[in-house]
Amino acid sequence: MSPEPAAASPSRTAVGRETVRVDGPLKVSGGARYTADFHFPDMLYAVPVCATIASGTIAAIDAKAAGAMPGVRKIYTRDTIGKFYRVPASGGGIIDERRPPFEDDTIRYYGQYVALVVADTFEQATAAAHRVKTSYRAAAFDVSTALSPEETPKVKSRRGDPNAAFDAAAVKIDHVYNTPIETHSSIELHASVATFDGSHFTLYETTQAVGNFRDVLAQMLGVPKENVRVVTEYLGTGFGGKLWPWPQSLLAAAAARDLRQPVKLVMTRQMTFESAGHRPHTRQRVRLGATAEGKLVSLRHDYAYSRAPLSSYAENCGESSGFMYSTPNLSVSEAFATRNVGVPTSMRGPGAVPGLYALESAIDELAVALKMDPVALRLRNEPAIDESKNIPFSSRHLNECLATGAETFGWSRRTPAVGSMRENGAVLGWGMAACTWMAARWEAQVSVMFNDDGTLRVASGTQDIGTGTYTVLAQMAAELAGVDVGKIKVVIGDSSLPPGPISGGSMATASLVPAVAQATREAIRNLIAAARESDSHFANLPVDRLAFHEGRVHRTDQPPGEGRRFEEVLASARLGHVEGRGKSEGTFRNKNPTVSTHSFGAHFVEVAWQPEIARLRINRTVSVIDGGRIVNPLTARNQIEGAVTMGIGMALFEETHYDHRHGMPINSNLADYIMATHADTPPMEVIFLDYPDTHLNEMGVRGIGEIGLAGVAAAITNAVYHATGVRVRDLPVKIEDLLASSVA
Amino acid sequence: MTSNEFTRRDMLTVAAAGTGALAGGSFPMTPAAAAPAKEGPESMPTLMDLSLSVNGKEHRLSLDPRTTLLDALREHLHLTGTKKGCDHGQCGACTVHVDGRRVNSCLKLAVMAEGAEVTTIEGLGDPDRLHPMQQAFVEHDGYQCGYCTSGQIMSAVAMMKEPWGSDDADIREAMSGNICRCGAYQNILAAIRQVRHG
């Protein structure tokens, strides 16, 4: 083994410091380029034609009149789009809607693409798309919301004898909770700008995973991966809705291939509700059995979710049920029911978010039944280890989250009786819930380069979906290399870069740490080697007598200030740059983990209920998050506040409705699919415990993109119960539900 | 085509007939914009010449009269800082100033903006010379993905001149036409408060 340069302890200042985003000035001045912002000479505009039935077959497509309209270049149908291929079940990449567009004449959901109009302008393409006449042979369909398992439920987790323990329990809870279909509704519409040069595609895409996107599109277009490049410089976020490709990308690429001109296709907001994924409907029965002292003796969580024809997507609602609380007897089972809706996909905190709404509601109901404080009940059932796998937790501080949250919120002043707290003429409700989300690493590769212009380049084929990846990568490299954040150039969002992690699962940051660390250290070694070769100041010194600090190569017997700046070292060596490469191994879905890695947290919520005008408001929230070491508290707090905001929407507003006559998502716009607006959000307090979890990486970073949403809806409905006495088990809370309240 | 579809072409017809309600009742109709469009094949309107004043610069354009102000800015003038989030006036991502007032540029046809002064995010400031509101958004992390940000900032700058009260609740209400799905509202509030109260 070659001796290591004495550069192992660079100045540790950048990680953990509040750092404004390095891409901030671009974002506030309109200079950050999102997919639909790309423009090329001779670019054409594509607009899909969408099915107006939810099930059946296409009888005929009459595009004659549309094709004669001004500016129309071509109208594609199954007969003319060209050949598409499927992606193999393993090794080809991930896509939720496996059927390529136009593959057959069968319609399986409302809004499925049946044709594509390409014209010189967006206005011409839109007008012509309206003139394409499609006739159908409609078939029966089902978009009902009453879910019953289609097959024998699959056991996901089991220990002890949950049925006998439940039957014998002193106190029992047995309720069914429903969460509706929710749509991601990122403000950026899904978009594709496809270019083709005769052999190679460059696809500007809205994706949370440029590498996977490249793999899938190469498969489906039938070309080698090397012939496809996918670029996402900035993403108007995704929340899972842009994790995997959707059919519009393939249509844009095929049109560009056929017409040999760049093609831009921006989905309409309505289309994003129909054919770009959603969180499926869930129906969850939770049975809890406890002793009179509040010790859980049995937990059963049986859930079903809606899914689509040709979809194998599973909403893993019981993901955290097996380890959240201590109980000797437990079972978790999964089932599905097929509905004629677009293909579902992951939405922020898939599985755990609807799952914890049900579980944390049931725990609150148990606390009421026991006449016990809900914080105390959770503390009493804190497990010593992950009982679902019989392995220790890497770092679990849920008790401290609960205690800190209760203290900060003022929970000790809570009076438990329904409707017993009042302020300014309103009834107050105080509710809380715990939360958790997995922590793991994806495989990741990173390149780090010292450049002769005095900058440090960090490159990886990952993305910044708004979480702050540009900035945390700069912070990590700054910390490891001892270079100012302002001197770091982060290059991401391009499939031609070293393969980076997907922006999903709250894992990108944790995945990047080992790769950035390895790459930076290798770059430093290469820089020191260059210094020894080319600079008489360092010549003939053994490598362990040289170090790199504060951007300078220096002798270990001298302070860094006596050394040479790295750009000077490169100049005298006549090098443009030296590079280091690093790689992180993935841990996600590790079959035999030795420790259980999860983040934890607790949310506390105050609602105000004004019975005389049936008005419900959220007054304030407190969230305490145990998410490992926080790289950037400024952007991290924003993540949690944003997630709590989404949780307010989940609890009070969000639901995609399907018209039972036509199978159409009828509130497929941003006025009728209601999300929390600025005026719906209250002051929020966020506290990070900031315990490093070094099991995943040397910086102790886990991930915080999703955990902030988990548990929020239950904390709100628990508060609503405390204010009104109405237990809402079907989200979202509707004012008409609360009219049943006897609190006046 | 189903009967409930309302196309921009229909909208143009309505607008040309003088129904001002669609645009708030006070858009300038120059003779060029009010003249009936030349008819092309299939009775489709062909191009119309117009002049748009954007960020203090005059642009001569020949546009399909169905083109919204938003698409004229983005697809023809390549001022892509203004974003399309819904194309229905529901999200606020396309907010620009028309004669100093905030407007959803997706709800205004480009021809309706002739004679007016349009300001977009690019006209407010650039990375080297940020407007105080842009600077405040950077300092307070008033965004995540950045997609709604141009609209948020244009709205925030315009609301400073509107008759709102001084409470945080007034800011929250005034800014509720701009949806931030990332939910950066606390930081947007902090940024606006800084500029408003110094």
Image (tube, coloured by chain):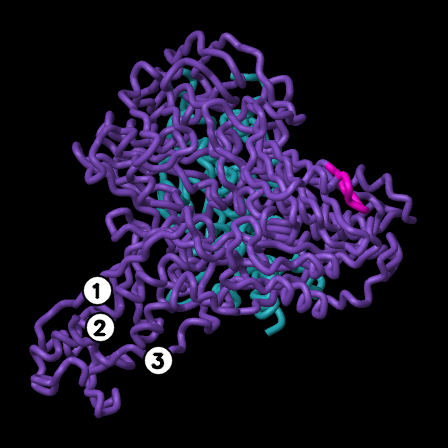
* Chain shown in cyan: B
Q: Say whether residue A169 is magenta.
A: yes
Which region is colored magenta? A167-175
Classify A573 as above or below A321. Answer: below
Q: In which quarter of the view is residue A678 placed?
A: bottom right
* Tag 3 residue: A11
Would you name the residue on which mark 1 appears?
A580
| Left-right relation of A457 to A714 | left
Name the residue type under label 2: Ile
Label 3: how many Cα within 10 Å (few below 14, some 14–19, many 20+): some
Secondary-structure class at tag 2:
helix
**Dividing the picture into quarters, in which one does residue A376 lie?**
bottom right
What x and y, as percent, mark residue B130?
43, 66
Residue type at tag 3: Ser
Tags 1 and 3 on a common chain = yes
N-terminal of the pair, mark 1 or mark 2, is: 2
Tell me, by letter, which chain the rendering colours purple: A
Q: Residue at x 30, y 36 (%)?
A: A91
Alpha-carbon span between mark 1 and mark 3: 19 Å
Q: Which residue is drawn at 49% across and 26% down?
A: B9
Q: Return the mark for residue A524.
A: 2
